[in-house]
Amino acid sequence: MKHNRRSIRLKGYDYAQAGAYFVTICTQNRECLFGDVVDGKMALNDGGRIVANEWERTAAIRREIELNKWVVMPNHLHGIIVIADNVGAHGRAPLPDDAPCNVPTSTVFTRPPKSLGSLIAGFKSAVTKRINELRKTPGALIWQRNYYEHIIRDERSLNRIREYIANNPAQWDTDRENPNLTGVQPRARTNNDDMPWEARG
């Protein structure tokens, strides 16, 4: 089975290079583990607070990255991650809130320790450990196997994604990730997914 799995990463792209990425990480079976949306706002439970804490901690312990807009939802997390090319003395990446994000392409795919994949793997592992300790459920799966990412190539795309993240809680009643939304199947995403921003070329 392992050899038949299809990668959802962009073939030939170096996910360790400088640039901005929009990521979505979903819970196993889209189970709502992190709280509820109340009056259009996300109310985190203890598990959700662990997710938020570990996401913020990601930037604190990794000098090469900076977190931009993000939100924890009942069964997923959306976030913009910036991998810095030249990291300053305080580990801050050179991307102000209104700056464009131009991401070059690479011909070699790698997964070094500071790559996007390694970052997400470390985050998921830390959250899983803490939530299982909290619930006393050792070995339980918290996250689905993979994650989804979109390479942010320009300022227009960056701003649209920021807006999408900010509005996500208010749109929960019609969100395809909402398991209480009847008659709609969860979104099947690919590299060119149907989210409201430019599809990757």
Image (spheres, rainbow, N blue to C red):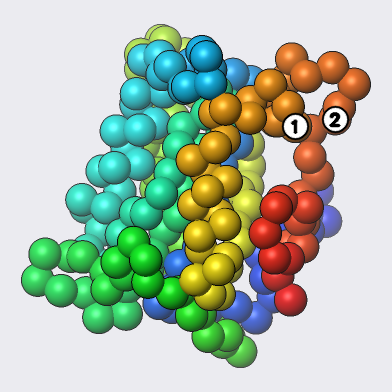
Residue type, mark 2 in image: Gln
Residue placed furthest toward the top: 136
Decide if residue 77 is on the left or right side of residue 147.
Answer: left
x and y percentages locating residue 151 in the rendered image: 57, 68
Q: Residue at x 81, y 44 (%)?
A: 188
Position of residue 132 in the picture relative to residue 6 (left or right): left
Dot 1 corresponds to which residue?
Answer: 176
Q: Residues within 10 Å of mark 2 (few under 14, many from 20)?
A: few
Element class at badge 2:
loop
- Marks 1 and 2 close (CB-CB < 8 Å): yes
Q: Which residue is pictured at 63% across the width and 20% down the height? A: 31
| 63 displayed left or right of 21 | left
| Image mark for residue 126 | none
Residue drawn at x 26%, y 43% is: 57
Asked whether 117 or 173 is in front, the reply is 173
Percent x, y of residue 16? 44, 73
Q: CA distance from mark 1 to mark 2?
A: 7 Å
- Specify the label residue 185 is tagged with: 2
Residue ranking furthest to the right: 183
Earlier-in-chain disc, 1 versus 2 = 1
Tell me if residue 166 comes above or below residue 142 in the rendering.
Answer: below
Q: Residues within 10 Å of mark 1 (few under 14, many from 20)?
A: some
The answer to whether residue 15 is visible is no
